[in-house]
């Protein structure tokens, strides 16, 4: 049997547990310059704004503990993150009533798209700590998105912009055949594969 597929109901179908923390991204780890880095919230909002790293860390923070799932089939359980609740930034930006979707913009032109509604949970953070330590650059530090209910490509590392749109706009992997919705419990890994692919 080439693969061991766990029947553990706490692990999404087709995933394998890892104790490590694999690193996956396209391009090089970007250099972070606190003098120029900003997190910008813009697009169809009443109150566009930007935050420096210090301003972000001065906001009330939230901890989230749980599991993360990569489409390449690893799941890491019991991870611990700290950051600013994304919902609180949305409240400050005040999206116009026409807003339906959000695009996360990161360094190296990485983007990923989601319905705004998918990002309003208690688990969706603009994260800057992992397991009680400053988030390492290889994992998206100092600041990344965390949307852990979905496959991990929906959590942009080195986040710098959040754009509010009145339509969907596919991101980096979504235009390359990854599923638009990315729910690991439904195994929404890829889209538009021919039926013989299995
Ligand atoms: N900016 C950026 N964010 C990214 C990616 C990327 O290539 N660039 N890859 C995504 C993918 S496919 C995964 S699985 C996770 C990996 O996060 P990790 O390296 O911390 O495990 O980051 C996501 N966020
Ligand atoms: Mo991934």
Image: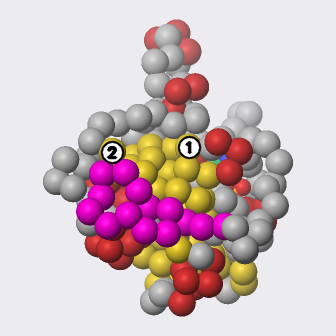
Give x and y (percent) for residue 163: 42, 51
Q: Does ligand 1 reach within 8 Å of label 2's beta carbon? A: no
- Describe the colour scheme in one phrase: secondary structure
Residue at x 57%, y 34% (from the top left corner): 173
Find residue 113 and report its image quarter: top left
Q: Which residue is mark 2?
A: 165
**Position of 156 relative to 93 (above/below):** above
Q: Which residues are magenta?
A: 37-50
Mark 2 or 1 closer to N-term? 1
Nearer mark to the viewer, of 2 and 1: 2
Q: How many marks?
A: 2
The picture places residue 110, in percent across and down from the top left corner, at: 62, 43
| Left or right: 39 in relation to 101 | right
Front position in the image: 109 or 20: 109
Q: Residue at x 57, y 72 (%)?
A: 127
Q: Is residue 30 left or right of residue 39?
A: right
Closer to the camera in the image, 182 or 10: 182
Judging by the rendered image, the residue that carries numbered circle 1 is 111
Q: Position of residue 27 (x, y in %)?
A: 79, 42
Residue 13 seen anywhere in this rendered image of the structure: no
The single residue placed furthest to the left in the displayed view is 97
Task: Compute the Cα span from label 2 to label 1.
Answer: 14 Å
Where residue 129 sits: x, y (%)? 65, 79
**Front residue of 118 and 32:** 32
Q: Is residue 68 left or right of residue 19?
A: left
């Amino acid at each position: 049997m080439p693969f061991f597929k766990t029947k553990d109901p706490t692990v999404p179908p087709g995933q394998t547990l890892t104790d490590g923390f694999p690193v996956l991204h396209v391009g090089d780890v970007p250099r972070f310059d606190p003098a120029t880095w900003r997190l910008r919230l813009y697009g169809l909002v009443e109150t566009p704004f930007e935050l420096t790293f210090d301003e972000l860390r001065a906001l009330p923070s939230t901890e989230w503990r749980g599991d993360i799932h990569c489409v390449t089939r690893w799941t890491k359980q019991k991870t611990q993150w700290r950051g600013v609740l994304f919902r609180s930034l949305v409240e400050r930006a005040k999206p116009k009533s026409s807003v339906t979707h959000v695009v996360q913009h990161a360094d190296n032109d990485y983007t990923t798209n989601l319905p705004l509604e998918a990002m309003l949970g208690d688990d969706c953070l603009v994260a800057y700590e992992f397991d009680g330590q400053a988030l390492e650059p290889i994992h998206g530090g100092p600041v990344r998105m965390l949307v852990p209910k979905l496959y991990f490509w929906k959590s942009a590392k080195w986040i710098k912009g959040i754009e509010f749109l009145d339509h969907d706009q596919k991101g980096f992997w979504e235009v390359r055949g990854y599923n638009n919705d990315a729910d690991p419990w439904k195994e929404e890994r890829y889209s538009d594969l021919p039926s013989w692919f299995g």
